[in-house]
Amino acid sequence: MVELDPKRLLILRQIAEAGSVAAASRALGHTPSAVSQQLSRLEREVGVPLVDRAGGRAELTATGRLLAGYGERIGQALQDAARDLRALGGIATGPVAIGVPPPAITFFATSVVHLLAGSHPDLTPRLVESGREEGLRALRLGELDVLVIEDDKQEPTPLPAGVEASVMFEDAYRLVVPADWPTPTDAGQLSARPWISAPAGSPRQLAFQRLAAQHDIVPSLEHQARYRFAVYTMLAARLGAAILPANAAALIAPGAGTVTTLPVPGAYLVRLLRRTGPWGPAPAVRAAAEALQNALLMAGERLAAQGLTDGEPRVNAHLVDPSEQTSPEQPGPPATMP
């Protein structure tokens, strides 16, 4: 039985690629005599010539070409093993696509590119402005690796297969009315009044539906604003009442609206969705997710320092994603970050 040394097959492959023993030795960093010795030993193992030395160029025989092909496969397998080993070692390299909604781009997401440049220079992050529905589709198709979504704790978005999620922060909802409206003492007083609504299935719309069912609220008219910046403008124009996350409500310009203390059922979430596999998310995905969380914390600290948040932002390690809930939800400490 012939026992082949894989190192010699790699040398034979290099001779085939370089065209001569001398060129192969330079590429391998060995002396020509060392390469010639390894080639001779391989020929003795096989029992037939592998290189035709008759001409000025080292040309492989048919058997030599056969074995050089196996050498090529061994070389590729070693490269694949090194790549997988780097992945297991947590080295984040290559491209990573990050989908974020417009509010996240404004408040914190652009910092991710700079954070990753410092912590993972071999990573190439790409930011993609993305709403929830198109983002989920892109995540399923592999066009995005990480996705930030605004969500509702009581009616969370189901996760696609091969995706895991965590809560970046959790917030209460606030009921806001235009500045020139009387401040209501009961949410039911806002029935038969205009409202600034949101697209169906969005967190703000789900919160409004719960509030409306609880207080028999029937709007006289529903304007619709997809993002909070449009809500701010409509509130300033006195178009109607609205529901916003607490920290978004805290950013309303003075005189543009009144943030009430009336309770709104439910809680607002920002969730971080990651593509994953049998061994968890890839290092690039983990690095991007960590950078997003850090960028959000930094943004929250900046807003708190300016007095623009509803309470002091803090990270709560006990936040549990709805996908991890296995038993009826138990009340826990409030956890907010802007």
Image (tube, helix red, strand yellow):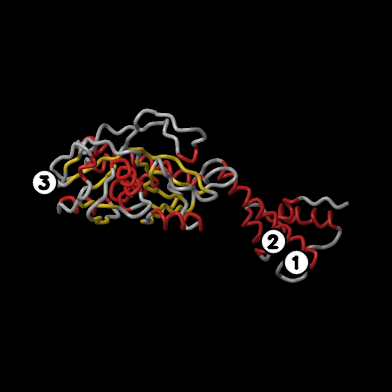
* Mark 2, secondary structure of its residue: helix
Q: Give the image location of residue 310, x and y in percent.
A: 24, 35
Q: Which residue is mark 1?
A: 60
Marks 1 and 3, Cα distance to the nearest angstrom? 90 Å
Q: Amino acid at mark 2?
A: Ile
Q: Earlier in the sequence, mark 3 or mark 2?
A: 2
Q: Which residue is mark 2?
A: 15
Q: Amino acid at mark 3?
A: Asp
Q: Which residue is mark 3?
A: 180
Q: Earlier in the sequence, mark 2 or mark 1?
A: 2
Q: Amino acid at mark 1?
A: Leu
Q: Nearer the viewer, residue 47 or 188?
A: 188
Q: Is residue 299 visible?
A: no
Going 38% across and 46% down the picture, which residue do you hit? 151
Frontmost of labels 1 and 3 is: 3
Q: Is residue 75 left or right of residue 261?
A: right
Q: Are marks 2 and 1 in contact (CB under 8 Å)?
A: yes
For residue 194, above or below residue 61: above
Which residue is outermost to the right? Answer: 1
Q: Give the image location of residue 80, x and y in percent.
A: 62, 51
Marks 2 and 1, Cα distance to the nearest angstrom? 9 Å
Q: Are marks 1 and 3 in contact (CB under 8 Å)?
A: no
Going 85% across and 52% down the picture, which residue do you hit? 2
Going 40% across and 41% down the picture, which residue do you hit? 154
Mark 2 surroundings: few (<14), some (14-19) or many (≥20) residues within 10 A: many
